[in-house]
Amino acid sequence: MYPELFRIGSFPVNTYGLLLAVGMMLALFAAARLAARDGLPRERIYDLGLWTLIGGLLGSKILMFFTEENVQIFSLDFLRSGGVYYGGFLGGFFALVILIRFYKLPFWKVADAFAPGVALGQFFGRQGCFAAGCCWGKPTDSIFGVHFTEAAHEFTGVPIYGPDGADLYLHPTQAYESIAMLVVFGILILIHRKKRFDGQVLIAYGIIYSIVRFTIEFVRDDPRGDLFGLTTATGLSTSQIISLIVAAGAVVFMIYRLKTARKNDAI
């Protein structure tokens, strides 16, 4: 893999950072297009998107601090790390809630515009993870196994040799999630075109992503800590526990909103 693309003098240009930036820009563009389709002002969506990204970055770092051991806040590794995704999602969500009230925009319409963009951003973000070597999977003998480079090992600590010194092949969990999120992006676009109520796209994202993440976690193997001892107690990863909570809440909310939409249609 190629964690570093090139250098400008002594300053490294990392693949992860570049792909993350591209993903963010395209996610904002997609959100603005969908928002305009629902009659929302594009310029406000760009403002919301930028502040939501900041909230997401802060949230990802905060959850990383609570779930991972020996985190050095004032270090280069902490700053360049992508953090924990669910923390980023929650941080961005809360930032969005606050700013929507400030701008006096309809929350569910805005959320529906942002949800597909989030999935698109994840597609690029996980490609960046794959290039860097972080978020790696368990060893495998399948045809999907990937052997990471020495550069990736130095950059993220991804294991590249087995106990016997032979090349180690791992599940490319980053690529699995990246491809899955591109598919999810397409599904959410279709839902947006045919949605029956405002908020349906965001709720669908919560359900679908939770299923994707819960499943991929079974073959993911990078150390990510234990939130409040839940991982040790349940045998599930922190992300799987959060996925179950998010999915359950989203399913309940989807059923409630669909019933409400049917009642409104009958009136």
Image (cartoon, helix red, strand yellow):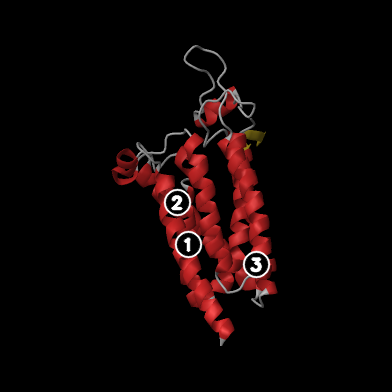
User: Residue placed at 49% from the left, 49% from the top?
Assistant: 85
Label 3 SS: helix
Question: Which circle marks residue 251 in the picture?
Answer: 1
User: Residue placed at 59% from the left, 33% from the top?
Assistant: 172
In the picture of the structure, the residue carrying the numbered disc 2 is: 243
The relative height of residue 112 versus residue 8 in the rendered view (above or below) is below
Measured in 3D between alpha carbons, the distance from the residue under mark 2 to the one under mark 3, in whole angstroms, is 23 Å
Q: Quadrant of the C terminus?
A: bottom right
The kind of residue on which mark 3 rests is His
In the picture of the structure, the residue carrying the numbered disc 3 is: 192
The relative height of residue 173 versus residue 188 in the rendered view (above or below) is above
Is residue 9 visible in this depiction of the protein?
Answer: no
User: Residue placed at 56% from the left, 59% from the top?
Assistant: 205
In primary-sequence order, the first of circles 2 and 3 is 3
Measured in 3D between alpha carbons, the distance from the residue under mark 2 to the one under mark 1, in whole angstroms, is 12 Å
Label 1 SS: helix
| Between 41 and 13, the one nearer to me in the picture | 41
Residue 180: image x %, image y %? 62, 46
